[in-house]
Image (spheres, helix red, strand yellow):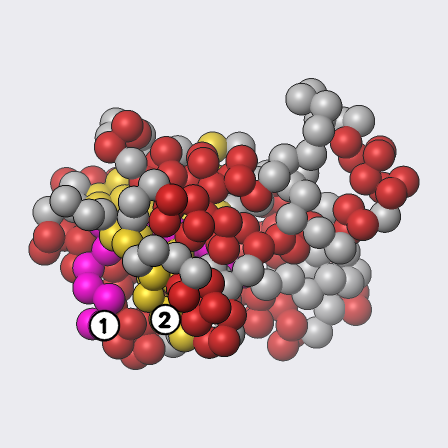
Amino acid sequence: MTTSMIVTGAGSGIGESIARCADAAGWRVGVLDIDGDAAAAVAADLADGVALPVAVNDPDAVEAALDLFGTPDALVNNAGIVRFGPLLEQSVDDFRAVLDVNLVGAFVCATACARRMAEAGGGSIVSLTSINGIVPGPNAGAYGASKAAINMLSQQMSIEWGDAGIRVNTVAPGLIDGGMSAPIFADPEFRRRRTEKVPAGRLGTVEDIARAVLYLCSPESDYVTGHQLV
């Protein structure tokens, strides 16, 4: 039986890689992204992709997307934004915008899917956090706080939804050469210094993250819930 997955923020970066890896593994993939053109382009390139041009923090739009796609076996909350700058110069609007997409968006999508998953007998939810949700970095605004909050929210979801057969986990990317970090690692000297700090001797790739996410969505991780894979 074909399994289905919705990936938010799947129009580019890590989300696109997750969608492509899931497609290669035989999943039917809902490519959910606020950029409708990007979602359509990725979905059209998949064997069984469905474009879902939706803002993750719009409950009505998310419900409409689920009506179209159906109840997924897995949800990957990947959509996120960042507003760089010193906290003393950060506007309240920018701070709220990051929380609204990263944290509220994850809540909206997870709860909408969980209601349907519970009726279907269960499912898996994986949300992307960040190493900056564990160890803060300067000039990241609300980003680190939003990612730390997603991890705690996911733990709460795991204990509340476990008896419905729903597993909830997170993946915290570290030094990844792709997604939001791509412009940062374009600086050769910065790239060299950061690479030296990685025990494996290389930066992580978007495919590394995608494979970790697929593991947590699969039956192979059936006993894993409430966990953050760093």
Q: At 84% across and 34% down in the image, what residue appears?
A: 192
Q: Amino acid at mark 2?
A: Leu
When asked about the image quadrant of residue 62, the answer is bottom left
When asked about the image quadrant of residue 220, the answer is top left
Check if residue 56 falls in the magenta segment.
no
What's drawn in magenta, residue-wise? 67-80
* Residue closer to the observer: 202 or 153: 202
Image height of 97 relative to 187, above or below? below
Residue 55 visible (yes or no): no
Q: Amino acid at mark 1?
A: Leu
At mark 1, the secondary structure is helix
Q: Residues within 10 Å of mark 2 (few under 14, many from 20)?
A: many
User: Which of the numbered marks, if any, corresponds to residue 52?
Assistant: 2
Q: Residues within 10 Å of mark 1 (few under 14, many from 20)?
A: few
In the figure, is residue 177 to the left or right of 22? right
Rendering coords of residue 186 (x, y %): 80, 50
Q: CA distance from mark 1 to mark 2?
A: 9 Å
At mark 2, the secondary structure is strand
* Residue closer to the observer: 43 or 228: 43
Q: Residue furthest right?
A: 189
Q: At 26% across and 76% down in the image, what residue appears?
A: 64
The reply to whether dot 1 and dot 2 touch (C-beta < 8 Å) is yes
The residue carrying mark 1 is 68
Image height of 185 relative to 31, above or below? above
Rendering coords of residue 216 (x, y %): 35, 36
Rendering coords of residue 194 (x, y %): 79, 35
In the figure, is residue 65 to the left or right of 34? left
Image height of 61 relative to 149, above or below? below
Q: At 79% across and 69% down in the image, what residue appears?
A: 89
Check if residue 78 falls in the magenta segment.
yes
Q: Quadrant of the N terminus?
A: top left
Rendering coords of residue 47 (x, y %): 34, 55
